[in-house]
């Protein structure tokens, strides 16, 4: 009967044992005592006798020496080592933690070699060997993770990470395989490249092959010509203004389109040319791809800009690479929109097909075929120089380091490359067979299946070879590896850290990478995906394992939805998992597990990240899926409301209006909460359409339902919406009722919300008659002080503008001027902001600087970047009326009459127009006739319909 292993409960304050770069336990540094702890922490429960033998081999009484060391440790850290015959510890070491880290995190945690500088006097040779083994093991782990980081980093950082991997402290001299992986990541002509080449050459000396060494270090095996063509096209001088252009890389799956695209990105970055890579794989619409492009150009931005606004984020002569645009049916339309909105940009697109009408004059079509292969009559040197041979040998080295090109196997390798038409992925998969078969068997298998590889009449692009090789590669996977690959088919791509949550252990991820079923596809990240070219095979295999796929989808949905609903909807990490979250939602809809809260959270993500156009289509598809699955009414309603809301936010007003109308006429509208949300959406649509009375009525209906449901949050939201519309209509009686209701709730709101509500109240009161202007100004100044101290610059400029308006009404011209200077100072530090230019015009008129005011008006009229809004247009007319009366009162009065009777003009502006019609001029200052006045007259004649016209303003 074996002795039970003693247990030890860790103390709450147990410190971490430091072994990397030194040896320390919270300041305790007695070497032998800590070496006891180090060994037990890494090896587990250890008999006392073993420890005594390892650490005190020459002592007369090693057990006594152990007791002394143990006593010294327990005096300072009583709970560090426990047990009697077998010592155990709850202490965690930085070395054990390091082995759990991947990528850059592993490098950051590596403070130095294991037990660096620690004297190992008096220990056994066996213990010294153990320390050296651990040192190499930990350093190799860090070295491998640094190399992984280099291989997935953006081009600007890849060389730095390759250098770190090459020079990892404590690592043994690098082997040829590591050198071959690091060399393509170095900067051409750099000292590091020369050093690695020299060391690799020394390792290759004395190999049995008399042929030239394969060019394993080539940055782009077999695609140098295509890469040179793309670089020459991309870097060619453009006319003034630049014309841009498009290059299309085509070819079958696995032929190397993405690899070539990524290498082009690397080269452009090395040349310090602006380039952006966009993963277009799986994008089905122009809206979705446009959203990905905006997100790539403005990473982390809460609301990615529209295509038209992206020019601000693209430097001159920029290149954008759209990789994997296979699923887009409207790619030509999208490219035309991109060229129209972003002139001068060079577009490099990779796709398996070439859509009609995509390319025009000056564009580049670059079809890819297999890598060059050696002809049947080639000698050893020619075979060695073949790119297909080099690729095969490079991939084979991942499982068979002893394989080299010799006179004895050159014909076999050349035959394999010819039979597989030089198809890169097919060659990589065939090379992976060498882990279980000899080269002769691989050759024989490819040879016997040759009939499948070439269609009748000859000629092939390698697709048949890929299919045959992929099937054989699949058969060579263990059942565990096959199940892991099938589980991953339910993902779009994934962070390796999420794999265990999907039922795929980390070691299987590494094995699938080795067997070329997975690839790292996004430079700068560790995200992985199944090779798109293998999706057909995997889909076919998945059909034979329905129970496994069902469970995989359930695990996938559970993991991603649990993670997503715990995140703020706008959190940037959610962007990378959006496709996985969408797939998870479709899964729970089919299973009947979906909730309205999940749909609402996904809607909030799209809304806050500015994904309105693409989100409209996304939620339309979810709504159809919810209806097909007979989901609960709350879930169906949530999906439909999300689609119509995002349609409104995307400016697709007719679509949103149509969806809202269908909903309100359907059975789902019987639920008060859903009806409330749809009424709010339709009200927002009506407001943008200028139907202010209809919008107000709809908001009031939504508010009544919110009151009925006791929904305090939406009550406040709808009341604030009503302020704007009631103010516009001039319904001041109802407006004051809303003022009182909102103010009654102010003491119960969070501070940030209180300030937002006070801003809305101030904006409404500013255009309500009978308000105390001095009190409004005092409120504005208090709020401006708060927003400025909080760094809310946009709100500060807006609020100071309100204070300027009150100063005008109080005839405080100097104070207004000081406030405008205050706002201008904020704008100078924030170039995207702008002070309302009409305030400056009004001040200049009021200060009797008519000529300057007229010049300012001319600048406003001629500003192509920031055209006037409808409200500003009417306000400008009201400002310049006294100027224009010198040209003729009849036309001016006709314009003012139109303003007073227009349904889409603010009530406050109508009141001002009536005052001016009565001959009033608030400034009381006569204005003269000038050239600027003539220009204003011509401009207004074009802007306003003639007298008696029924057209809206």
Image: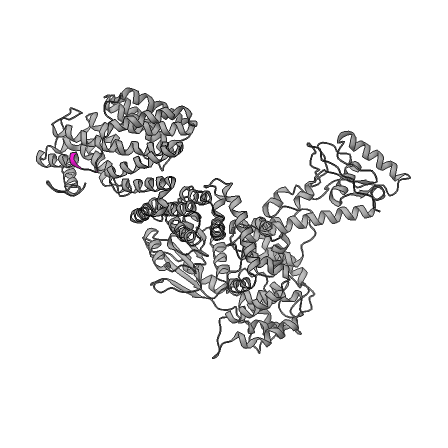
In this picture, residue 572 sits left or right of residue 845: right
Of residues 33 and 121, the one nearer the viewer is: 33
Of residues 233 and 124, the one nearer the viewer is: 124
Of residues 93 and 213, the one nearer the viewer is: 93
In this picture, residue 390 sits left or right of residue 2: left
Residue 340 drawn above or below residue 858? below
Q: Main secondary structure of the magenta part?
A: loop
- Residue 703: x %, y % from top left: 33, 34
The answer to whether any part of residue 660 appears in the image is yes
Answer with the quarter of the image where residue 229 lies. Answer: bottom left
- Residue 400: x %, y % from top left: 67, 64
Answer with the quarter of the image where residue 51 lies. Answer: top right
- Residue 666: x %, y % from top left: 33, 48
Q: Which residues are magenta?
A: 900-904
In this picture, residue 11 sits left or right of residue 54: left
Of residues 385 and 717, the one nearer the viewer is: 717
The answer to whether any part of residue 823 appears in the image is no
Which residue is pictured at 70% across the width and 49% down the height? 137
Is residue 249 on the magenta stretch?
A: no
Answer with the quarter of the image where residue 762 lies. Answer: top left
Quarter of the image with the C terminus in it: top left
């Amino acid at each position: 009967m074996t002795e039970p292993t003693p247990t030890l409960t860790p103390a709450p304050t147990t410190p971490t044992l430091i072994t990397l770069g030194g040896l320390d336990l919270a300041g305790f540094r007695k070497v032998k005592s800590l070496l006891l702890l180090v060994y037990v922490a890494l090896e587990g429960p250890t008999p006392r006798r073993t420890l005594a033998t390892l650490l005190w081999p020459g002592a007369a009484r090693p057990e006594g020496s152990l007791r002394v060391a143990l006593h010294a440790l327990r005096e300072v850290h009583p709970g560090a080592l426990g047990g009697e015959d077998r010592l155990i510890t709850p202490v965690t070491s930085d070395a054990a933690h390091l082995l759990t880290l991947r990528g850059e995190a592993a490098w950051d945690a590596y403070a130095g070699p294991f037990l660096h500088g620690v004297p190992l006097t008096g220990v056994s040779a066996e213990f010294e060997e153990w320390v050296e083994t651990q040192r190499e093991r930990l350093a190799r782990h860090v070295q491998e993770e640094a190399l992984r980081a280099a291989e997935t980093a953006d081009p600007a950082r890849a060389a730095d990470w390759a250098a770190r991997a090459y020079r990892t402290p404590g690592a043994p001299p690098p082997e040829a395989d590591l050198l071959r992986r690091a060399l393509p990541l170095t900067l051409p002509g750099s000292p590091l490249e020369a050093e690695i080449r020299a060391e690799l050459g020394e390792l290759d000396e004395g190999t049995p092959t008399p042929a030239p060494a394969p060019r394993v270090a080539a940055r782009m095996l077999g695609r140098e010509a295509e890469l040179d063509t793309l670089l020459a096209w991309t870097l060619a001088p453009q006319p003034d203004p630049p014309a841009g252009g498009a290059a299309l890389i085509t070819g079958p799956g696995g032929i190397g389109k993405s690899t070539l695209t990524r290498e082009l990105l690397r080269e452009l970055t090395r040349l310090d040319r602006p380039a952006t890579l966009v993963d277009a794989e799986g994008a089905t619409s122009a809206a979705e791809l446009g959203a990905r492009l905006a997100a790539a150009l403005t990473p982390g931005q809460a609301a990615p800009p529209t295509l038209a606004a992206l020019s601000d984020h693209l430097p001159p002569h920029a290149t954008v690479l759209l990789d994997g645009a296979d699923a887009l049916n409207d790619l030509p339309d999208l490219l035309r929109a991109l060229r129209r909105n972003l002139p001068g940009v060079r577009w490099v697109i990779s796709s398996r097909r070439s859509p009609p009408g995509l390319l025009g004059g000056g564009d580049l079509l670059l079809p890819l075929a297999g890598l060059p292969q050696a002809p049947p009559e080639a000698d050893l040197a020619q075979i060695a120089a073949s790119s297909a041979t080099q690729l095969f040998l490079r991939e084979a080295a991942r499982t068979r380091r002893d394989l080299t090109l010799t006179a004895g196997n050159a014909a076999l390798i050349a035959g394999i490359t010819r039979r597989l038409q030089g198809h890169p992925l097919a060659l990589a998969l065939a090379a992976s067979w060498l882990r279980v078969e000899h080269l002769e068997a691989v050759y024989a298998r490819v040879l016997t299946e040759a009939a499948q590889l070439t269609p009748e009449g000859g000629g092939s692009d390698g697709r048949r070879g890929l299919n045959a090789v992929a099937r054989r590669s699949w058969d060579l996977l263990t059942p565990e590896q096959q199940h892991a690959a099938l589980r991953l088919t339910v993902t779009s791509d994934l962070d390796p850290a999420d794999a265990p949550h999907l039922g795929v252990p980390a070691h299987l991820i590494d094995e699938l990478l080795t067997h070329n079923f997975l690839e790292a596809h996004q430079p700068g990240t560790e995200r992985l995906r199944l090779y798109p070219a293998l999706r057909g095979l995997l889909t076919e295999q998945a059909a034979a394992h329905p129970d496994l796929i069902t469970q995989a989808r359930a695990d996938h949905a559970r993991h991603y939805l649990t993670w997503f609903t715990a995140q703020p909807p706008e959190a940037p990490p959610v962007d990378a998992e959006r496709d996985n979250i969408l797939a998870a939602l479709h899964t729970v809809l089919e299973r009947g597990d979906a909730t309205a809260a999940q749909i609402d959270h996904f809607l909030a993500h799209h809304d806050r990240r500015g994904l309105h156009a693409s989100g409209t289509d996304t939620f339309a598809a979810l709504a159809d899926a919810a209806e097909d699955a007979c989901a609960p009414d709350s879930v169906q309603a949530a999906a439909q409301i999300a689609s119509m809301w995002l349609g409104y936010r995307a400016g697709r007003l007719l679509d949103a209006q149509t969806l809202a109308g269908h909903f309100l006429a359907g059975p789902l509208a019987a639920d008060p909460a859903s009806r409330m949300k749809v009424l709010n959406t339709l009200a927002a649509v009506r407001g943008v359409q200028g139907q202010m009375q209809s919008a107000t009525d709809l908001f009031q209906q939504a508010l009544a339902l919110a009151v009925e449901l006791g929904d305090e949050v939406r009550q406040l939201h709808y009341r604030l919406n009503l302020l704007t519309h009631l103010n516009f209509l001039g319904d001041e009686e109802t407006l004051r009722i809303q003022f009182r209701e909102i103010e009654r709730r102010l003491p119960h709101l969070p501070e940030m919300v209180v300030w937002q509500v006070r801003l809305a109240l101030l904006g409404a009161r500013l255009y309500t008659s009978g308000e105390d202007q001095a009190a409004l100004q005092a409120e504005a100044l208090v709020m401006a002080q708060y927003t400025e101290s909080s760094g809310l610059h946009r709100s500060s400029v807006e609020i100071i503008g309100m204070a300027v308006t009150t100063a005008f009404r109080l005839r405080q011209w100097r104070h207004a001027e000081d406030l405008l200077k205050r706002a201008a100072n904020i704008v100078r530090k924030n170039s995207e902001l702008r002070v309302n230019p009409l305030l400056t015009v009004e001040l200049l008129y009021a200060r009797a600087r008519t000529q300057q005011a007229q010049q300012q008006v001319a600048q406003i009229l001629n500003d192509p970047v920031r055209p006037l809004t409808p409200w500003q247009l009417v306000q400008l007319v009201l400002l310049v009326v006294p100027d224009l009366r010198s040209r003729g009162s009849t036309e001016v009065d006709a314009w003012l009459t139109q303003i007073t009777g227009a349904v889409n003009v603010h009530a406050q502006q109508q009141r001002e127009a009536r005052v001016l019609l009565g001959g009033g001029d608030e400034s009381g200052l006569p204005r003269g006739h000038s050239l600027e006045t003539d220009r204003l007259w011509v401009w207004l004649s074009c802007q306003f319909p003639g007298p008696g016209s029924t057209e809206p303003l």
